[in-house]
Every structure is written in C-alpha cells, then in structure tokens.
Image: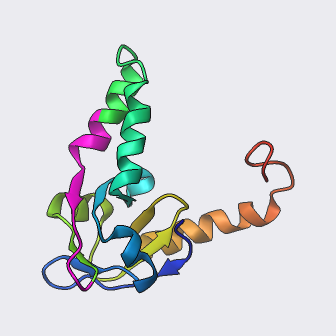
C-alpha cells in the first residue's frame, strides 16, 4: 500500500530516487505509464500484471476499452530500480507529466503517482476544499 507525499528532485539525467519506504515493494520491478491528470502512474510489476489480467476481460469491441488500453500501454515502461532505489524516467513520460526538477511522489493506494510539483500543488489546492466539504458518500459503502 502506498501512502504519503514526498518531494524528490529529478537529476540532470532524468533520474528519480524513490522514498526509502517504497523501495522494497518496487525492488523486483515496476511499470511506469501515463496516469490521469498528466501524472505518471507507477505500479509494482505484479500489481500491473494483475491490472492487465483484469483488462483482458474487457470487451475490445468497445472503442473506450481500445482507446484506454492504447494510451495506457503505449506509454508503459517496465523498469528495475538500481540499488539506490533510483529509476530513469523516459523522456516521453517526463514530457507528458511536464516534469522538470521539482517533483511530487504521492501514494495512491495500489500505485505511486509522479507529478510536476507545481501541477500537484495546483491540483491539491483546487480539490482540497471540495474534499473538506464532502458530506455524502464519495465511494459508496466506504466513505
């Protein structure tokens, strides 16, 4: 499970060091791909494989399924972090997420998300008030 917000910096080669608390879970491999709202979604390899098995059950005759899988998988990169917990984020994903030096890595339950820090701060500012004002169930049966 991934929780929290961290603000590592990209180095000049596009490398990012994951927070120590996540390294063990990602050490055997991960998949990075396009996430919603122009972030990078990072899944442990086994979690991503499970998502793909679920996706195989979706009808490929449905255009929405094809479109979603094309965008998701065409941007996917499988990576094994080095011994320092460092990964290189490919140029196409850095461009997609608008990453520069300042980043936010946020825990999102089954995945991490990598955001350009200004984009994350703007997103959070926009969504926090709605979060505070929520008075009905957001996720039916849970919250």
Q: Which residue is drawn at 40% across and 69% down?
A: 25
Q: Nearer the viewer, residue 15 or 39?
A: 15
Above or below: residue 73 compared with residue 44: above
Left or right: residue 138 compared with residue 51: right
Q: In this view, does 103 lie above or below 41?
A: below
Kindly give the residue lying farthest to the top in the view shown: 61
Residue 85 in sight in this render: yes
Left or right: where 30 falls relative to 64: left
Q: Name the residue: 56% across, 76% down.
A: 4
Q: Is residue 11 left or right of residue 130?
A: left
**Res. 124 image quadrant:** bottom right
Query: Magenta stretch containing residue 45, yes or no?
Result: no
The percent position of residue 112, horizontal first and vertical second, equals 44, 65
Q: In which quarter of the image is residue 132?
A: bottom right
Give the magenta range.
70-84
User: Could you tell me residue 16's position as x and y percent?
Assistant: 27, 79
Residue beneath the point at 13% across and 80% down: 13
Q: In this view, does 132 lie to the left or right of 47?
A: right
In this rendered view, identify the residue nearer to me: 76 or 27: 27
Q: Residue furthest left?
A: 13
Q: Position of residue 143 (x, y in %)?
A: 79, 53
Number of numbered markers:
0
Q: On the rendered image, what quadrant is the N terminus found in?
A: bottom right
- Picture residue at 29% right of the left edge, 71% below the top: 99
- Describe the colour scheme in one phrase: rainbow
**Residue 9 position (above or below residue 28):** below
Q: Can residue 116 be seen in this view?
A: no
Is residue 81 within the magenta segment? yes
């Amino acid at each position: 499970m991934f929780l929290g917000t961290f603000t590592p910096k990209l180095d000049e080669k596009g490398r990012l060091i994951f927070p120590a608390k996540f390294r063990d879970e990602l050490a055997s491999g991960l998949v990075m791909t396009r996430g919603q709202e122009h972030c990078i979604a990072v899944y442990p390899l086994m979690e991503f494989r499970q998502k793909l098995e679920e996706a195989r059950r979706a009808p490929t005759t449905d255009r929405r399924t094809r479109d979603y899988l094309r965008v998701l998988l065409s941007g996917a990169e499988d990576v094994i972090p080095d011994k320092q917990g460092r990964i290189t984020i490919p140029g196409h994903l850095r461009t997609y997420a608008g990453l520069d030096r300042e980043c936010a890595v946020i825990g999102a339950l089954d995945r991490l998300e990598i955001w350009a820090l200004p984009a994350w701060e703007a997103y959070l500012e926009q969504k926090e008030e709605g979060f505070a004002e929520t008075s009905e169930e957001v996720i039916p049966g849970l919250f």
